[in-house]
Image (spheres, rainbow, N blue to C red):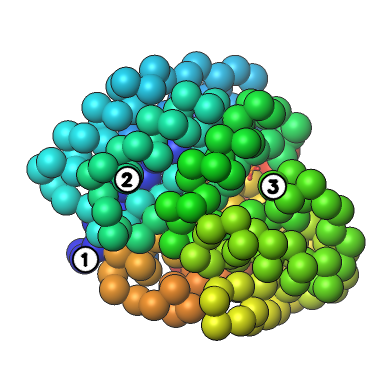
Amino acid sequence: MQGRVLIVAGSDSGGGAGIQADIKAVTALGAFAMTAVTALTAQNTEGVEGVFPVPPAFIREQMGVVIADLGVDSVKTGMLHDAAVIEAVAEEITLRLPGIPVVVDPVMVAKGGHRLLEESAVEALIRLLIPLASVITPNVPEAEALVGAAILDVADMRRVAEELLGRGARAVLLKGGHLPGERVTDLLATAEGIEAFESPRLETRHTHGTGCTLASAIAAGLAQGMSLRESVIRARHYVLLAMASAPGYGRGHGPLDHAV
Ligand code: PLP
């Protein structure tokens, strides 16, 4: 096992998304997962029933003890709940993890519609966390919220990816799965340009935790010394396989199969 990933995210009691998906993905790809839990959710495949936030000081404590002892090769952030959590996490990364790759999944709203980041915290995400990111991984609704513009097609995705680069992220993986069409296009934008990755659309309702899984899989690759491009290619492949073999548990959006 090689590569230590510090996951800063929320717990999903249903095991499909959040910290649980993150740990499964990082482990399946051969890296070592450590966690700073930002909130507990009472959640199943049908939706989020309740959220119990962790105080920012205790999130810092979880990060601090792990960094001081085990060491960290990459960071992945997911659900951050509110602006105070974003401030705490951004400060810990800045002070204690300079130069370590950071994957920021700008989680905002769960598929069932429950908010996982307060609306007032989007500004803090843009101002404090995006400039620290090696890569941010928004889906279409998240990218729209970050730039305040509608995305209707891949041409719009290109414009928005470039705009997000301008906000200080070193790279943007803009995921096109929410747009209609038989194929799904994700764009990886860096200072070198924009590369498009395409895959067939899988007709399945078992998509719970795909975003968490993809971001953690990228963080695992970066922790293992892979380039961002290699990490993205392996992570997309992993998520596709995990969706294709989803076990079908639950009445709603079911979990993926991480043991692929
Ligand atoms: N719950 C938690 C704790 C999460 O971090 C996330 C992911 O981003 C979700 C739920 C959302 O999962 P999905 O939108 O895939 O249902």
Report which quarter residue 216 is drawn in. Answer: bottom left
Report which quarter residue 17 is drawn in. Answer: top right
Q: Nearer the viewer, mark 1 or mark 2?
A: 2
From this view, report whether residue 253 is shown above or below residue 182: above
Q: Residue at x 40, y 55 (%)?
A: 102
Give me the C-alpha separation between circle 2 and circle 3. 22 Å
Near mark 3 (Cα within 10 A), the count class, few <14, some 14-19 or many ≥20, is some
The kind of residue on which mark 1 rests is Gln
* Image mark for residue 2: 1
Question: Which residue does the numbered mark 3 point to in the structure image?
Answer: 146
Give how far across and how far down residue 77 sits, in percent. 45, 45
Give how far across and how far down residue 56 sits, in percent. 38, 22
Give how far across and how far down residue 149 sits, in percent. 83, 52
Q: Residue at x 49, y 41 (%)?
A: 128
Question: Which residue does the numbered mark 2 point to in the structure image?
Answer: 94
Q: Residue at x 56, y 70 (%)?
A: 236
From this view, report whether residue 220 is shown above or below residue 194: above
